[in-house]
Amino acid sequence: MSITPDQSSALSSSPAPVVYVPPTHAAGNPSVSPDRIAAPVPPVVAPAAPAAKQIPPRTRKCSNVWGVPFDHVTLDQSIDAVDALIQQGTPSYVITANLNYAMLNHHDPASMGPVTRDAALILADGQPIVWRSRWNQEQLPERVAGSEMIYRLAKRSAEQGWGIYFLGGEPGVAATCADQLARQYPGLRIAGIESPPFRQLTDQEQADQDARIQNSGAQILLVAFGQPKGEKWIHQNYQRLGIPVSIQLGASFDFIAGTATRAPEIWQRFGMEWAYRMMTDPKRLVPRYAANAWFLIAALVEDWRQLVIRWGMWTPQT
């Protein structure tokens, strides 16, 4: 799908939510068409999914890093964990937590604590978190980046017949992201695409949005509201919406749509993706990463202090 500049301008100036509801062909292959742009739109009833491969229930094994219990999973294992949650059928959500999330969780336990506590799966989406886990008895196996996870989710969804609902991002970004994934993974079912306005929805708008999501037949709800807005929104709404798995994936929509560029692999390997992103968007990201750096330094100093105390090399004054 392509969005023309005139369409994009019209959408961004509209005070109502921008909603894309793709038609479903007889063969079950989705397409995202600009002539289906409307708000509100009657809900689309999804076709029945094929029988899913059975994934055995997973026993959670976590490693606590700076107050966040990260699950011991690789990227492949995280997709199997999502598969198991979908088969379980009860509403749940996944957090892709980076250093910024750990900082927010530390500084605002009143609002972030319940979000962290109730997550079904928390993934280490930051190399510093993986490195820090090496001080623990149980080390995290690898970084699980949301920007890589979204491709694996699309692939598994196409194989299993799951529907994905894309929620958030600038007008046109989610639609382009969904279209790119549908082209890359034939058979991927796009349950819905929606770019809400950057304001509080009215009661009627919220009710309409709820109905679209609830009636979409989606097994996965991907949210791009930013951090921590996305995680808080999911925690507040996931049980009411009833989608088996909801995930806040941050900039992943932009990376796939081409409106943002992900760092080259060498930058990622050395844990410097933050620096690359900061250079591409300094006005927005310099303050954030400066705060992250101060948190990281303070957290490492406290970690070293606790380690010295455990070794019996220093006894704090009471």
Image (spheres, grey):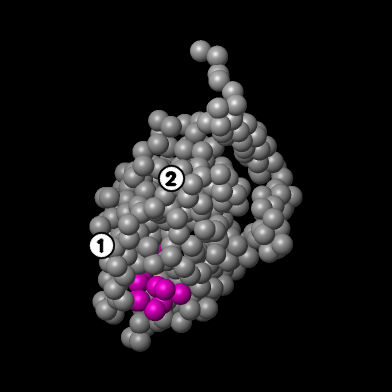
> Which residue is rendered at x = 71% and y = 62% of the image?
266
* Magenta highlight on residue 289: no
Residue 65: percent from left, percent from top: 50, 42
Q: Residue furthest bottom?
A: 27
Task: Please rate how many residues cluster around mark 2, counting C-alpha atoms within 10 Å: few if below 14, some from 14 to 19, many from 20.
Answer: some
Total number of numbered discs in the rendering: 2
Residue 215 visible (yes or no): no
Q: Badge 1: few (under 14), some or many (20 or more) residues near its Cα, within 10 Å? A: few
Question: Mark 2 or mark 1, which is nearer the start of the sequence?
Answer: 2
Dot 2: what SS? strand
Name the residue at 40% across, 43% down.
116
Inspect this view and state whether residue 181 appears: yes
Residue position marked by numbered label 1 in the rendering: 89
Which residue bears the numbered disc 2? 69
Is 59 situated above or below 54? above
Vertical arrangement, residue 69 with respect to residue 170, above or below? above
Q: Position of residue 252 (x, y in %)?
A: 55, 60
Q: Is residue 142 above or below residue 289?
A: below
Between the residue at mark 1 and the residue at mark 2, the CA separation in whole angstroms equals 23 Å
User: Which region is colored magenta?
Assistant: 155-165
